[in-house]
Image (cartoon, grey):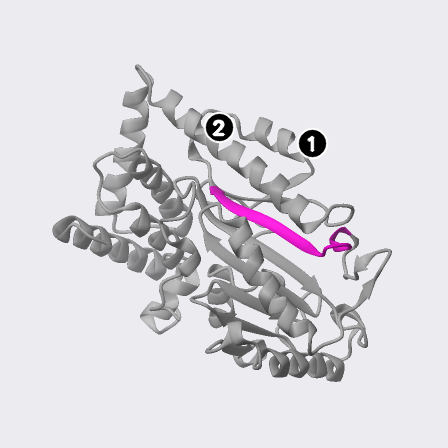
Amino acid sequence: MLKIPVGWARADGPRHDVVLSSRIRLARNLADAPFPARSSAPALKRSLEAFFGAARRVPELSGAAFVRMDDLDATDRLFLVERHLVSPHLAENPSGRGAIVADGECLSLMINEEDHLRLAALRPGLSLPEAHSKARAVERSLASALPFAFRRDWGYLTSCPTNLGTAMRVSALVHLPGLALAGLIERLFENLTRLGLIVRGLYGEGTKVLGDFYQISNAAALGRTEAEIIAAVGKAVGQVADREAESRAKLCAGSGRNRIEDLVHRSAGVLQNARLLSFEEAGQHLSYLRMGLGLGWSLPGSPALANELAIVTQPAHMQMRAQRELSPPERDAARAAFVRARLAAATSFGRC
């Protein structure tokens, strides 16, 4: 999987300069089994086998990778978290749990996480309807083979009450360095909260912000239709993208342009020359490089390469590339060397 391009991180799709990816996640539980947190080890195994068996007959999952989490070591599990294919919770609790990955990593199914099934479809850019169509197609195929817990008054039954109803989480991963530099992030969070939305870190709930990337999603799934939730989140994310574009333009206007150009070009210089780079430092410099590239400035690399480097420079990725466990200083040295080489190749050959 290390050599497979991440389909949802392509530098295309609507508003891709700000919106890296869109995701639709559907939660489902088996009607005849307790929630995973209350399941015994044998019950978890039965649920896992049931989903694996049903998924092998789903056309959209043809050629998928079926992963038993307890067959993986800690680095492999962290790698899947870094690719946004499984949650930190699933990786930290591997026994009796699994994942299915398909469609160039644009489809992922977590088995026995908080719910029996967490099905996610991802697409590059602001593409929520397309992601929803794919997620729904897979869910319908699975529902024809498995009994999902549903009540007419509450909708789909889920482990967490906030997911009741449609049991759908609609989210977008957005890049907001302009709003961060302008000091407008906190005000943005307040406005989104009033609209019934949640802002989280790079890897979702309980994770911190890295490289100016934020996840924006609906706070509740009950009381509105799927179409209404998608429309509301899509409208809000579109407005956030507009505000980010305005912030970038204002920061680059007049005398302020020198400060932003200096910030961006210093980051490009660090990335091209550093001998040690922590993941956090690399993420921040790549954030500014990505912003400069989005503004059309002449800089090393491309938006596609900036997206790629933001993913493949994560800790587990560096260890898998080295094919051994690395100490933090070794990872920092390997990361710096890898970034230098990729930017040098892009500069020399005019491609990523």
- Please state the extent of the stretch shown in magenta in the rendering: 162-174
Q: Quadrant of the C terminus?
A: bottom left
Rate crowding at label 2 as few (under 14), some (14 to 19) or many (20 or more) other CA atoms within 10 Å.
some
The tag on residue 194 is 1
The x and y percentages for residue 226 are 68, 51
The x and y percentages for residue 201 are 55, 46
Find the residue positioned furthest to the top: 254
What residue is drawn where x is 77% and y is 54%?
A: 165
What residue is drawn where x is 53% and y is 78%?
A: 66
Could you say which is closer to the camera, residue 8 or residue 274?
8
What residue is drawn where x is 69% and y is 79%?
A: 145
Q: Is residue 232 visible?
A: yes
Find the residue positioned furthest to the left: 348
Which badge, 1 or 2, is on the more N-terminal residue?
1
What's the amino acid at mark 1?
A: Arg
- Reading the image, the residue beneath label 2 is 243
What residue is drawn where x is 72% and y is 55%?
A: 166
Find the residue positioned furthest to the right: 153
The answer to whether mark 1 and mark 2 are in CB contact below 8 A is no
Q: Determine if the magenta segment contains residue 253.
A: no
